[in-house]
Structure formats: structure tokens, C-alpha cells
Amino acid sequence: MTPITDQIFDSLQTVQRPGDFYATGRLDIFLPQLEVAGVGRIALPLLSMQAEQLVAMAEQAPYGRGQETLVDTDVRRTWQIDAPQVTIKGKHWSENLNTIVSNCAAGLGVSGEVQAELYKLLVYDAGSFFVSHRDTEKAPGMFATLVIVLPSEYQGGELVVKHQQEAVTLDLQSDDAAEIGYAAFYADCVHEVLPVTQGCRLTLIYNLVRADKQLPLPKPPDYHQEQDLVAALLHKWSNLLRAKHSDEIPEN
């Protein structure tokens, strides 16, 4: 009989790549120069006065249901500003963004060139939230969403991401103005933003796009077949040891 270690090794050879359904991290940065049409230069960390100005010129963010685009504050209470109204500059911003995208691509298990396309600037003031939903494809080649939380003082607003039977809650807030939190997740993941209870959460939303449109879109890694096979092998091994009344049966 083939040793169980060899059987487990053979079963794991079918795993094609590393990665997970989400990726997250923090990065020390030089603060970018953020400008919004109609408001001007935005101070970071975000000032409460400017948060009010952003809300005043933003629009209530809608959500999709089937072929419809709806506004319902019982489902989504968020303020949005479209990408053409947002300018992000700074000597180091391109480098910082490239680092974030590279880290996220590696965490998602994606190879090849990945581009980040700015989609929205979202403003979550006190009471804002977004219930569980899935993102729709917003650009050709889009396979994931990238969330970057800019320096802003707030409480609540955690990001919850779910895929199959797994779920993770991510707190992307940072107490250090020179550090930003970010997260990326595959577009077919169910996710939600928990209510902001205090302050204002300022967030950049990017579409992560595969540069080579000829390649198939990446999908979340799925190792359930390998997990089930390894579990069956270990169960079989345990039963064999038990049948031999072996002292080698592992305890809990």
C-alpha cells in the first residue's frame, strides 16, 4: 500500500496556485494630493468640515438589482463621487498604488499584469452602511474590487467579505495618518460594509482588471476537492490504526 504521506502529497499536486478569495494589508505612504471637483484640495486626515462639503456635493450611491439600478437607503446609505471628479496626485502615489495592487494580486493568487482603474470615491458618514451584495462587472477584464481607506477618523465601517462557507471581517482603519489599510476581493464575493457609528470613512474604490483581455478572468481558488480527499485519507488511516489497536492513533 502506498504510504499515506505519498497519497496526501499526490492529492495536493492538483492545487494549481496559491491565493485566497480576499487579500488585505497596510502600507506606510506619503500622503497623496487629493482633489475633488467642486470642493478643491482635500486635507488628509479628513477634516469634519470637508467631510460635510464632500457629502453636500456627492450623490446618494445606488445599488444594482438584476437589470435595475436603485436608490434605497435601507439597503445602501453611502455617498459617492464619480472618478472623473477625483484627482489623485503626489510624487509617490503611483508607486504606492502599484505596491498595493501587486500585493493584492499575489494575495488573490493572480499572475500577469493587473491594472487598477479608479471607480468611485465613497464617503461613509455616521450612519452609512451597505448590506450584503455582490459587485457587477464594471469594466472589461474586471475580476476584483480594491478598497483603499484614506486617512480619516471614524468608528465602525468594517468590511465583511464572504465566499462559499468562509467569511472574514476586515477593519481597515489606521490610527497613523501615514498608513493606509486596503483590501481586495473577487467580484463574485458577497460583501457588506457595517454601519459607521462615528466620524467619516473616506474610501477609494478601484476595479482590478486583467491587462491581457485575451486571458480568462481569474477566479477565487477552490480547494474543497483537495480538502475532502485529504480528510478521507486521514479518516481511512485512522480507521486502519484503530483496527490494529495501535497506540499511534493521535489524540485530539
Image (tube, rainbow, N blue to C red):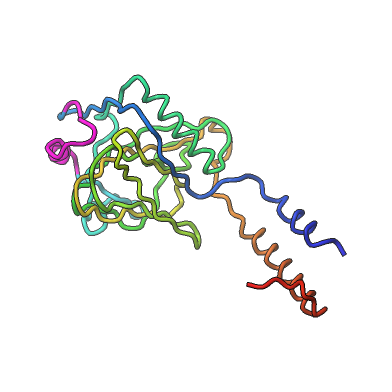
Task: Indicate whether 64 appears above or below 165.
Answer: above
Image x and y of residue 49, in percent: 12, 37
Answer with the quarter of the image where residue 150 lies: top left
Task: Indicate whether 114 appears above or below 25.
Answer: above
Task: Indicate whether 42 appears above or below 125.
Answer: above
Residue at point 45%, 29% (across, down)? 98
**Image-based side of 158 in relation to 13, left or right:** left
Q: Would you say residue 138 sits in the magenta stretch?
A: no
**Residues drawn in magenta:** 40-59
**From the image, which quarter does the C terminus lie in?**
bottom right
Image x and y of residue 196, in percent: 24, 52
Answer with the quarter of the image where residue 39 lies: top left
Image x and y of residue 149, in percent: 32, 40
Residue at point 29%, 54% (across, down)? 130
**Residue found at the very far top of the displayed protein:** 91
* Count of picture labels: 0
Residue at point 59%, 54% (across, down)? 222
Image x and y of residue 217, in percent: 54, 41
Task: Indicate whether 94 appears above or below 200.
Answer: above
**Residue found at the very far right of the displayed protein:** 1
**Image-based side of 64 in relation to 186, left or right:** left
**From the image, which quarter does the N terminus lie in?**
bottom right
Residue at point 35%, 46% (across, down)? 172
**Residue found at the very far front of the displayed protein:** 247
**Image-based side of 142 in relation to 81, left or right:** right
**Image-based side of 83 in relation to 229, left or right:** left
Q: Would you say residue 46 sits in the magenta stretch?
A: yes
